[in-house]
Image (tube, helix red, strand yellow):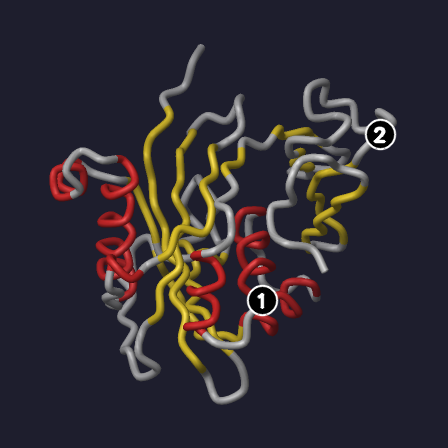
Amino acid sequence: MSVEIRPASTVVLLRDGEQEMEVLMVRRNRALAFAGGFWVFPGGAVDDADREQGGNDPDEAARVAAAREAEEEAGVCPDPEAMVLVSHWTTPVGERKRFSTWIFAGEVAPDSEVVIDGSEIHDYQWIGVKQALATHKAGELPMMPPTFITLCAIARYDTASEALAGERETPCPRVLPLLVPLEGEGAFATLYPGDAAYESGDLEAEGPRHRAFLSNASWQYVYEGVSEPPLYPQD
């Protein structure tokens, strides 16, 4: 049975901190069926009002929705016109809920007050981008692959303005992962274009590796021998 793919949008809210560039992470209610308890960026579904305000242009509607969701979920109001599209992700085939999700980045003032909704969002923190990745590596900041990949992309920059300028010049990946279950409850790998197993799902297939997998409760991104572009520039 086919599953409707719903448009959604999220925004990576950045500010310059005393030690390093910081990102606003919000924690979803543990009771939610989708990504319950995970740390995410503010976001949600694109609605009819967003489409109308965006002139029925899907990209503009997503931009409007990302800014609206940031205000509704976190009380923070980024300038939608200044936001930069970082990537676009489509939920893998086979999932019960599927979304076509635009991920933007936007800068906010260092003293922006955060007010969470207390419904879908139960906690928040401003955290250094590199610190967030280190904390996740230690198994203490659970997140989904798109969140992890996005943080890896943003971690290449030192300031919020540098991040927006850099991402404005970086090609926007449009990603449809292939989800492959692994041994263990809830364990899986996500495969991306160029991986030898992207069509078959055979993780042992010989050839290029373009995938992410959980190791000790943290995601690892593997890009080896692939002709397709990486999801973020590699060193």
Q: Earlier in the sequence, mark 1 or mark 2?
A: 1
Residue drawn at x 42%, y 29% is 97
| Vertical position of residue 98 compared to residue 218: above or below | above
Indicate left or right for 40 with 182 as reference.
left
Residue 212 picture quarter = top right
* Quadrant where the image shows the C terminus: bottom right
Foreground pick, 172 / 204: 172
* Percent x, y of residue 110: 35, 82
Q: Which mark is residue 169?
A: none
| Residue hosting label 1 | 155
**Secondary structure beneath disc 2?**
loop
- From the viewer's side, name the closer residue of 35 and 223: 223
- The furthest residue to the bottom: 18
> So how many labels did they put on this image?
2
Question: As shown in the figure, which amino acid type bears the numbered disc 1?
Answer: Ala
Residue 228: x and y in percent read: 67, 35
Task: Name the residue at 50% across, 26% down.
Answer: 95
Question: Which residue is under mark 2?
Answer: 207
Mark 1 → mark 2, Cα distance in angstroms: 29 Å
Quadrant where the N terminus sits is top left
> Where does the image place residue 28, in percent across and percent down from the top left?
41, 54
Which quarter of the figure has residue 114?
A: bottom left
Q: Secondary structure at mark 1?
A: loop
**Left or right, residue 139 beside residue 173:** right
Mark 2 residue crowding within 10 angstroms, few (<14) / some (14–19) / many (20+):
few
Residue found 24% across the figure and 43% down from its top: 60
